[in-house]
Image (cartoon, helix red, strand yellow):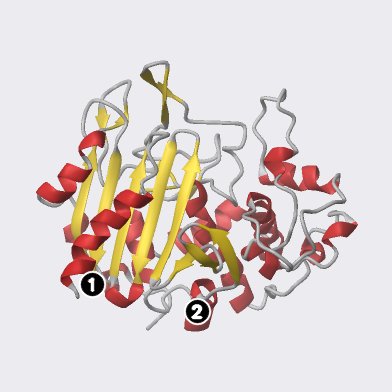
Amino acid sequence: MNRLAPLCLLAFSTAAMAGAGTPADAGIDGLMQPYDGRFPGAAVLVLKDGHPVFRRGYGLAVVEDGTPVSPQSNFRLASVSKQFTAAAILLLAENGKLSIDDPVKQWLPSLPAVADTVTLRQLLSHTSGLLDYEDLMDPADTRQVHDSDVLQLLEKENRSYFAPGSDYRYSNSGYALLALVVGKASGSDFASFLRQRIFLPLGMNSTFAHQDGVDDVPHRAYGYSWIDGHWQRTDQSTTSAVLGDGGIYSSIDDLAKWDAALYDQRLLRRESLQLAFSPATKTDEPDVPHYGFGWRINGDALWHSGESIGFRNVIVRYPKQKLTVIVLSNRNDPEPYPLALAIARRWLDTAR
């Protein structure tokens, strides 16, 4: 198949993705009842065999004016974004622009000596040992940091958590650096590369690595937190402008197109997908025996959550069963991972 296949060849029906959503489902609606009201809500998508068998919005995308959540609502994905950063690196590797075993200092030479032996592979798999940039930020400085600021913070720190490749520690710093490498290797910038090489070719027309003043997110859902007995808008923090680790906005409708592309070679070669989905390192995190490149791996399940101020999201894929559950929410609580597992069991149990 042509790797930039036309949208008519996507594994789901565009017509089926139009409109407000699929009919109500008492079981899922019951699970989602805490999101269904005049408060921040969620969007839920279940894909089975490439088709949307459940697709609905609950609650409000914008509390202040009563805009409801719809399948087109765009949420800040937070760390669900990391799978796109990893895909960008793999695309550039396919194009011969870089190797995943390149030293990161080949691309970002201003990093200190402690990063001399750190490779892109280690950044992808969270085994670099580089310090977490959030621990290096000045708490008195309220300005937003960007990926380039992460590099500047790390330039000053010639220390690490462990020797590169010797252990695992989840690293937002690593994925911010990967975004900068994408820019260097592509001759573009990270947001533009994603837009031109991933989002638009897949028909994810409303998905952006969002930059204030550069793009406008359509159908934007704003983030909220429960504070002092009511929902308050908490849409942005000082780290919300870092793109590589969590700055992508997308909807369940656009993510359905992304999910479809992960089953064939319309975007990435089979070998690249295998790299992303194969265990690169062991972890001691709950439900994460292994981490790949931008994906947590738990048996047959590939998944990733995303937490940011005012947003909690998760995507859980079962490729062998051709089942995917996505829950995007614009509130600070609760974590939707257990909810996604409960929804998935409805299809997994019937397949046994």
**Residue 134 to residue 113: above or below:** above
Q: Residue furthest top?
A: 228
Q: Which SS class for mark 1?
A: loop
The residue closer to the viewer here, 40 or 214, is 40
Q: In the rendered structure, which amino acid carries the disc numbered 1?
A: Asp
The answer to whether mark 2 and mark 1 are in CB contact below 8 A is no
The part of the image, by quadrant, that contains residue 303 is bottom left
Q: Which residue is mark 2?
A: 274
The residue closer to the viewer here, 234 or 320, is 320
Q: Position of residue 110 (x, y in %)?
A: 85, 54
Residue drawn where x is 51% and y is 50% of the image? 79
Q: Which SS class for mark 2?
A: helix
Q: Residues within 10 Å of mark 2 (few under 14, many from 20)?
A: few
Quick one: quadrant of the N terminus? bottom left
2 or 1: tag closer to the N-terminus: 1
The residue closer to the viewer here, 314 or 98, is 314
Q: Position of residue 171 (x, y in %)?
A: 64, 53
* 41 sits left or right of 215 in the view: left
Quick one: quadrant of the C terminus? bottom left
Q: Position of residue 272 (x, y in %)?
A: 53, 78
Q: Position of residue 210 (x, y in %)?
A: 51, 43
Q: Which residue is mark 1?
A: 49
* 20 sits left or right of 335 in the view: left
Q: Is residue 313 visible?
A: yes
Mark number, residue 115: none
* 264 sits left or right of 169 in the view: left
Residue drawn where x is 45% and y is 47% of the image? 77
Q: Is residue 204 visible?
A: no
User: Separation of disc 2 and disc 1 at Cα?
Assistant: 20 Å
**Residue 251 to residue 333: above or below:** below
Q: In the rendered structure, which amino acid carries the disc numbered 2?
A: Gln
